[in-house]
Structures are given as structure tokens and as C-alpha cells.
Amino acid sequence: MIPRPRPERFRLRRTMMFMNAQKPGLIKDAYIYGCDSIMLDLEDAVAENQKDAARFSLYHALKTIDYGDTEVIVRINGLDTPHWQEDIRVCVAGGADGIRIAKCESAQDVLTVEKAVEKAEEEFGVEKGRTLLMAALESPKGILNAYEICSASERMLGVAISGGDFRKCMQTKPTPDGIDMVTARGMMLIAARAAGVQCFDTVFTNLDDQEGFEAEVLQNKAMGFDGKSLINPKQIRFVHQVFAPTEKEIIQAEKIVRAYREQSAAGVGVFTVDGKMIDIAFIPGAERTLKLARACGLWEGDLV
Amino acid sequence: MEILKPAMAGTLESSDAQVMVEPGEDGIELSLESSVMNQYGRQIKATVLETLERLGVENARVAVVDKGALDCTIKARVECAVFRSCGQSAENIPWGGAVK
Amino acid sequence: MKNAVGRDIPDFLLVDGKEVYQGKNYMDGKYLQKAAPKTRRYEKPQESKIVSSLVDALKQCGAKSGMTFSFHHHLRDGDFVVNMVMKAAIEELGLEDLTIAASSLGSAHDPIADYIEQGKVVGIQTSGIRGRMGEVVSKGKLKTRAIIRSHGGRPRAIEAGEVHIDIAFIAAPTSDCVGNCRGIGGKSNCGSMGYAMTDAKYADHVVVVTDCLVDFPNMPASVEAIDVDAVVVVDSIGNPKKIASAAARISQNPRDLMMAEDVARVIASTPYFKDGFSFQTGVGGPSLAANLFLEKYMDERNIKMGWAIGGICGPMVEMLKKGKVGKVIDVQDFDLDAVNSINQTPNHFEMSASQYANPANKGAFVNKLDFVVLAALEIDTGFNVNVLTGSDGILRGAPGGHPDTAAGSKCCIIVTPLIRGRMATVCEHVVTVTTPGDCVDVLVTDYGIAVNPLRPDLIECLDNAGIKHVPIEELKEKAYSMVGRPDDLQWEDEVVAVLEARDGTILDVIRKIKPYTLED
């Protein structure tokens, strides 16, 4: 049995890769591709009559496979199905880092799941509050309620939009410039930032259209997403490249953090770096840049 | 657990195993086919028997067709087949208890 | 007696000057007495050498029981000729005690397993053996021990007279009426005929079997009429669909691509990666995909590949046409792109198996190779590779050019997933050593890279390039931690096949496998 460290609510999540929890050949080592999080799927990827089998597979995978630093999140079946409660029990018992709530539409949905998670944590002797949650917004109602969803629980790590279902509701199709979802993406991002949680974009499903994929990732980065859901390992590299800080940003961040440490030790609150006014408000951003740089293999310092 | 009706779990895809259980009378009657028989046959047999024992299955005919599955997959397939045969695979599984 | 790779070779095999494997280049500088064939003079001008049937050809060549017939494997799994000839010899002429000396055999030759079981075929000498034939030989049904050689070891053995070919049967996509053969221009095209060339020169008799007769002279000929006794025209020599695939596609499997990218990074980190470098790659998923990533590094550094050899397929032809590689010299073609290019695209040439890989001639192409990228069924912590026997101990593979290119090249890279299903590819001891560890330099897996400690220079290259690598033992332990430690295979004493190193020494033996029981 592999003991997993306590999940971190805020950590690097540039890439979340979906994997069918029912396929032993896939889940045994999905971490080798270097994505930040693996999303083991009990929902759409698993046929209705194999939901039970997928849970047994998932349980033993969680218990025996060493996923290392890769975060393991499980997408459970929707609250309108007969499966979600047992899904939650197996996730908690197996020690998944987080649960992704499919088709989340309200704070109440989050609370319903949270209650079941709490009960399962008690049943299986898991530390209370260990299991994180995230919500997938798949409908207009979910988007409109994004802020209450994001702030519904201390366990919430973030929200993701799910393009397939959302576009169906909106009667749109994917467009090259992303105009079909730009409003929803923007609303979700604002809500997530307001609530202080992370925000992830939907999958890009046409594996043959690398150009389209790259354009979407660049837009994601520009809009302020923390990361993206993926369906194939070959998509990981580009996302990590795009989400990596530039050399200039890294140097600047290092200077800010270093200067802040020195100045605050000397009791100074506001100071300048390269002629720019800096105070404590800049520190979290600079530290995040350095952590990201380290994860991208671009920086080896020990400031953070 | 008592095997009530024939049940199956798993597939014949590479890295998977297909497990079939049927009611039996005289202990565990195991038939095993494996693509890695010469190196892992005994280990697979031991895993299957241990899993059945943990589930308290005493009498059953069990047929395993293994396509190079890891131990964790073999366990999962045996457990699923047994719970299905009792009509109990959908909820209240004893995770971490008899299933571990 | 234990050989240099730690394999116990029974003393009864060490007769008539046979030695155990002593390490690479052991035979360097020694002299070789070549064996000449006894051939018939055709002094009187002949209008045509066409005979009406295989039986007539066999009769004309004095076929009798106890003879050795040779074949090439350019028609791969589409080949009809081996079965056709053996059927004529055994069922129509009633011959027995025959030996098949083929450059390789595959599942197309399953019917030969019956002749083995009937005791009609008593000897097999080949590079590859698969399917039912592999099974019956592994079960000890062949009367003599099979002999397995590499693609370079085979022409060496033929030239040295260790294999004496009584009649060579040359499957030819096209031939003229006197036996000038080519691999193109017909309906069952295979491109290069490199593996047939030594046979034609060293066999007492040569019979060409074709399904497409063309006007004299069929030029430039791969096998020349001066060596041919008879030409037989049949309806079909093979199934074109199985001879050459439509086009070898570069794998889209993310695991293959990830490993291929690492292979290219390793190559680019060495001093051999400079303008004019030479390269060979297998056609397996990750090996072939390495082409793709290598091209990126070549563009980046503005360098070109000097030449490439091997079994060739489309992606390499594509690079030739784009001017990214100077010359392509090939002994075998794997897809139609390559078949249609050889001797047609400027700078795409054909070579013989001896020219390709024979360690006993005066300098084969493999000796000038900078890089070779190869697959493996298994590789052990001594970097010994197995590409012949399955994890169950049954013959189901081929050394092919693996040991030859590994030994000749400056940097031999093995690329393979760490585990396949439940089998650990990186293991403690391979079932059979087909390529000795002293010829293998780098291992690339999906779980990390290992460098042979015999190559501190390459370790330094990788370190300088910031490419992480680990001791191979670590990869083995990782594999076992996932799949569990396998039981050792249980063998009988009986040796069913002898595996020769390319230099003719004995590298390993394959014994009969004991039936497995589930009881401890």
C-alpha cells in the first residue's frame, strides 16, 4: 500500500489528464508523462454496466500504484445518477486527493457532496477535510452560480468548465477564436478569482488539430486560467511550455522575493526594485512565479 | 460470501483479466489461463485464492483468463465477479475491509 | 563451459573448433578459408533456363534426401516459396532428411512445422523463427539442433562453409529467362534482395522462382544469371499485402513518442552527432519515431545525415528525398515507399547481407555506423538483449541485424517500454542472450534512461546535456516493483537450438522448456 501525502489545496495544476478508471493498462502509470494531475474517470468513460467494476479497479489502483508527486483526482458520476454515493465512498477509502463533481450547478450540490465525503472520511478513518473537491460547470446555470459554487466549501480547490455539455446547452459549436465560450470562461474566471480558488479550461478533443489546440492554450493563458484538462499525453508539453514563466519574469520575481526578505528583516515595508515600487502585495505573485519556474525546470533556487 | 449465480468481470484486453465465478459445492475449483503462465502462474493462483478467502468464498468454480494483468487488477476482477454473483456490487462495498 | 556473457555452453557442442563467445572482436585479424561451391558449367549457349515445374528444377539440380536448401526472407510474411519448394521436394519427390537454411522464417511457414514433426525436415538454420515452427522446435521435435544466426553471421557461415547450400531457391519478383533477378517491376515486389546474394554465390545450384517473367536482360540484376541453373515460373510467389505494408506510419502512441524523443536527445548529446553522421533504426514504434525527433535536432544544428542503412521504410526515404540524408543503402525494404524507391531515387542503393553486416569480411557497413536504435524483448542488468525467445522460453523472434549493428556502431541505443503487460522488459537475466551487453551502450525506457558503465564517455555526454539517467538496476527494480518478481523458467537438459554469435562462437543455447505446473 502506498501512503499518499496530504493533498494541497493550492498547488501547481497546469495539466489535468483524463484517464478511464476502468482500463488497467492506462491507469497503471499515467504519471510518467509528467502531467500535474491525473483525472481518473468514473463518469463518461465508463459504460453504465461497468460502474461497479471501475470502482474495484480504482480502489486497488489508488492503493497500490505509486503516483509520486502527481495529484490524483477522481471524476465521479453526477448527482442525478445512482452511482455518486458509492463513487465517493471508494474515492475516500482509496485515498484520492480530490473529487471532481460532474455537472455542478449550485452551492448546494457542493454541500451535498461535502456531506457524503465527510461521512465517508468518518467511516474509513480518513483525516477530516483531507479530501479536496472541485466542480465541473457544464451548464449555463452552473456558470451563473459559479461564485457561490467556488466559495461553498473550504475543500474547494477550483472549478473547470466542461465544453461539450456547455456548448450543447448554448446551442453552439467550437469556434477557432473561442468566441462560443468566451463569456462563460470569463465569468467563471472572475468568480474563481473572487472566491480565491483555481480555474481550469475544458479539454480540446480534436487531436489532429494541433494548431487549434495551441491557439486555445495561448488564449487560456492570456485569460488567466491556472491550467487545462487534457485527453492525451501529447498535449502536456505545449501547455507546460505556455504556462511557464519567461526568463525575465523569473529574474524579476527572484529579485522581489529576495529584496522583500532583506527589507522586511530590516523593518522596511515599501521599497523599490529596478525603479518599481514594491510592497507585500507583490510577494504571493512573485513566489508563485518561482514555484512555477521550478516545476517547469527553469529555476533551481531555494527562496520558496 | 456465497456464490449465488454465475457472474463475470474484466475483459480480454492486454493487461486485463477476465474472471468468471459460478456456484460450486466442493471447495474452490480454479482454472487458470495466462499469457505469463510460466513466470507468474503460481503468483496469480495465490492472489486469486487469497482474494476469495478474504471475501469468505468457500465453494465456487472460478475461471481466470489472464492477459498479463498486474496483481491489483486481478484482485479487482475477482472481487467484482464475486460481488456481482451475490447481486451486491453496486453499493456498500466493504472498502478496506474484505476488499483490500 | 561458461562464455563471456555468463552462459553455460555444454561441452558436447564445443567440437570441430567451435568455441564459446569470448567478447566482441575476438576473431579480429584471424584468417578465414572460404569454401567454394561446386557448380555446373553451362558452356553451350542456352536460349532459356526456364523449366516447367519445381519438381523438374529439383531433378535438374540433382536434389536428393539429406540436402540443404536455402531461402531468403524478403517476401516476409507473404512468402509462398518456402512452402511450395518443400512440398514439391517432400510430397512429390519423396525426399527426406532435408535442412532448411533460410535468412529468416515466419508464421507464413507454419506448414513446415508438419514436415518437422514427420521427420522430413531435420535441420533448420535461420535468423528468425516464429509461429508453429518455433513451437515445434522448442518442443524438441526437430531431429537436429536448430542453428540461429544473425544477418551478418549467416553470410559469414556460408562463406566459411559451415553451411553448405546444395540448392538455393531465390524467390524473385522479376526474372528474365536466364535468371537475372530484381526485386521490383513485378506483382510481388520486395525491393532489395540483399539476403539472397551470398546464397547465389555460394550454393552448388541456384533455382530462381518468379511470378513475373520479363524481357532479357533484367537489369540491374540483384542476383545474376551467371549463378543461376534454372528458372521456374509460378502463378504467385507471395501475397503482396504481407510482403510490404502500404506505408510504415510513425507511431502516434504517446509512450512511443516520449521514448523516441529521449532517444533523439541522447543522440544529439554525443560527439558523433555532427554533419555527415550515419544512422540505422529499427521499424518498431519508438525506434522509427526517433527519426521524427532527430530531424528537429538536425534542423536546429543545421546538419545533415551522411548515410543511413538497414531495413528501410518510408520515413527514411522521405528524408532522402528532402535532402536531409545523403545516401540510403539497404538490405531489405519494409514498405511500398521503400520498395518503390530503391535503385530509383538517386542515392538509394541496394547491398548484400555480407556488405551490410558480415563480421568476417573486410569491412561491412555496420562497422562505419555512428548510431543504431533498436528494440528488445528483454534487456538485463548486464545490458544483454534478447530478441529471440519469448518470456515462456519459446522461440518466437529473430536476432536479425541486432547483434551486428550493435557491435559495429559507435553508439547502440535500445529503446523499449519498461514493462509489457506483466512482463518486465528490464530484468535480472534475459531468457536468451542474442546481443551481448558489451555491444549495447544506452537503454531508453518510459521510466528513465540507463547508460552502460562500459561507456563513461557517453555518461559524461548525457550529464553535460542535462539528460537524467539512472543505473540499470534501478530500472529493473522499478519493473519488478510493478509486476512482481517472475518465477525462473524451468528447462530440460536437451538443447533444441544453438545461438551463434555473429563471429561463429556460441553465444547461448535454447533448451527444451519443462511443462509448467501450478503446484509449488
Image: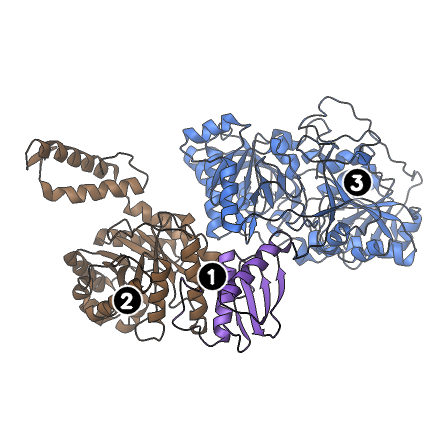
Chain of residue at mark 1: A
- Judge depth for marks 1 and 3 and give the one in front: 1
- Give the residue type at disc 2: Lys
Callout 3: SS: helix
Quadrant in the picture for residue A203: bottom left
Residue at position x 74%, y 45% in the image: C511
- Near-viewer residue (C323 or C296): C296
Q: Colour of chain B?
A: purple
The tag on residue A119 is 2
Q: Are marks 1 and 3 in contact (CB under 8 Å)?
A: no
Q: How many marks can you see?
A: 3
Mark 2 or 1: in front is: 2
**What's the chain of the residue with tag 3?**
C
Image height of A249 relative to B43, above or below: above
Separation of disc 2 and disc 1 at Cα? 29 Å
Chain A color in figure = brown
Q: Is residue C175 visible?
A: no
Which residue is tagged 3?
Answer: C199
Quarter occupied by the C terminus of chain C: bottom right
On screen, residue C425 versus residue A269, left or right, reads right
Q: Is residue B47 above or below residue C37?
A: below
Residues under numbered marks 2 and 3 in contact, where contact means CB atoms less than 8 Å apart: no
Residue at horizontal 26%, vertical 72%? A170
> In terms of sequence position, does the residue under pointer 2 or pointer 1 come before the other?
1
Local packing at callout 2 (Cα closer than 10 Å; few below 14, some 14-19, many 20+) is: some
The Cα atoms of the two marked residues, 1 and 3, are separated by 50 Å
- Indicate the amino acid at tag 1: Lys
Q: Callout 3, which amino acid? A: Asp
Specify the label residue A23 is tagged with: 1
